[in-house]
Image: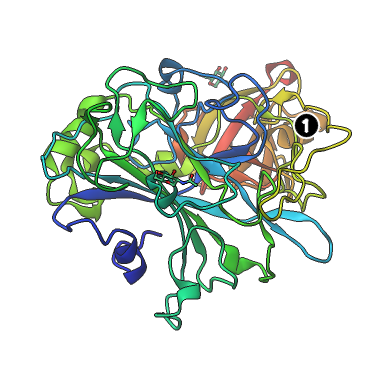
Amino acid sequence: MAFPKTALLAAALAVIPSVYSYWIFGGTPPVVTTRLDSIVSPGQVGTHVHAVAGGSRFQATYDFDDLSKSQCSTIPVQPDKSNYWAPQLYYNDPDAGTFTPIPTSFNIYYLMRPGPKNEKIHAFPTGLRMLAGDPNRRVNNASSFADQALTYVCLDFNQDHSGDPDWEERPDFFPHQCPDAMRAQVFFPSCWDGKNLDSPDHKSHMAYPIQNFNSGDCPDTHPVHLVSLFFEMFVSVDQFPYAPGRWVYSFGDNGGLGIHGDFQDGWTDKSILQSAIDDCNDVQGNAQDCPILKANMNQAAASACKPEMNIVNEAVGFTGPLEELPGCNLLWTGTGPKPTCNPMPPTPSFVSPKTPLPSGWHELGCIAEGTKGRAFTSASTTNDAMTKAVCANFCSGLGFPYAGVEFGRECYCGNGFSNGAVNTTVTWSDCSNTCSGNRNENCGGPDRLTLLYNPTLH
Ligand SMILES: *[C@@H]1O[C@H](CO)[C@@H](O)[C@H](O)[C@H]1NC(C)=O
Ligand SMILES: *[C@@H]1O[C@H](CO)[C@@H](O)[C@H](O)[C@H]1NC(C)=O
């Protein structure tokens, strides 16, 4: 999912000497997609839906200590429990008027970008928060570093359109389809004031370097040069028919200038990040080439990672197209003010990302299937709306104390363990299959059951 060698990326990073090292956490999926923003709207339902990558304890309000307790991160290097987020992009169907979320992943770049003074590059200070971009931006200022840091790339692997200005990297959406998806790109400021982990506008404690938005020496006001953070939000616009103005951010913007990115530091061990910065001088994109990063990778945990904390109790489009974008987010075209809602939509409550188990049932963990056949043989069902709760209810109704979900959509019941299966849990991340009925929880895995038990039925 990372394309460091393409001509398009080379154009994006053309001002940077290639000798500087960088690595990419490529193809990182969101851990959750919900209407929360712990930086801009702490403690509240946010103004618009975000796709959030990284640590599993993302929530309405938290601090570094809370985030660092995340069970997992969608980033393979598990000590990076940071959260990285951006507005969810939707496809607005021109006939039905509905909104469907466009599949999204992130390529997260860490770049060593000192200027002519060759300043030392530092790991993020613990708990740093920052914002780049602004959902209210309606005009591009080509001479502003903050605006230059926000770009779009149209992926066209055949390169049929090289030299055509309509296909070049640009500050807003393209006036045509992107045959191999689109990237929305956010380059964060890398110079820190050395004092504040956040600021009222979530920006002024940070600054872009003197010479360029993506490299250079830090100004005296913000003298601490941090590792540069850049992410590409990879959106599969190619999976939907193209029509002008039909790519719409969760806040209603169908032009693209309102792209923004948020970062909340959650690196649990800064010595790992600092060692990677200091010692992995030859790495050109592949994080596996940096020994300390490689040693801390756990792809199984990253792939199995699901949100732990409350989300907003509303559909965001994954179970069917939405009639309206969540929150007060009417289509917002052109350069005029954001349309307002009358009446305002009601504010939903918070809810657990997992479907609650019926009374008496407990989750005991991930177990292996039987060696000679199925662990539970008394009853089974399979469907596209499977959750742990659905399975527990099914087995409860038949009077069985054990229930196990497997492969995301299968449910098995029993009075005890059969075929050599035992009541011993295996690594949690073996149960890595998303439940067919809830994308925020796992229902077993290949040859693995998430085990549910109700002692009152025993
Ligand atoms: C555009 O950005 C430049 C550089 O930051 C700034 O000096 C200028 O005032 C900006 N122009 C507008 C219209 O905001
Ligand atoms: C299975 O193991 C769990 C966790 O150790 C325990 O709570 C439960 O009682 C066990 N069930 C049986 C039937 O042994």
Residue 417: tell me if it is visible: no
- The quadrant the C terminus occupies is top right
Q: Quadrant of ligand 1?
A: top left
- For the point 57% across and 47% down, the residue is 258
The x and y percentages for residue 270 are 25, 26
Q: Depth check: 92 or 390 in front?
A: 92
Secondary structure beneath disc 1?
helix
Q: How many marks?
A: 1
Q: Which amino acid does the dot numbered 1 rest on?
A: Asn
Q: Quadrant of residue 296?
A: top left
Q: Quadrant of residue 151?
A: bottom left
- The quadrant the N terminus occupies is bottom left
The residue identified by callout 1 is 393
- For the point 78% across and 36% down, the residue is 394
> Crowding near pointer 1: few (<14 within 10 Å), some, many (20+)?
some
The x and y percentages for residue 450 are 57, 35
- For the point 78% across and 29% down, the residue is 396
- Extreme residue in the right direction: 343
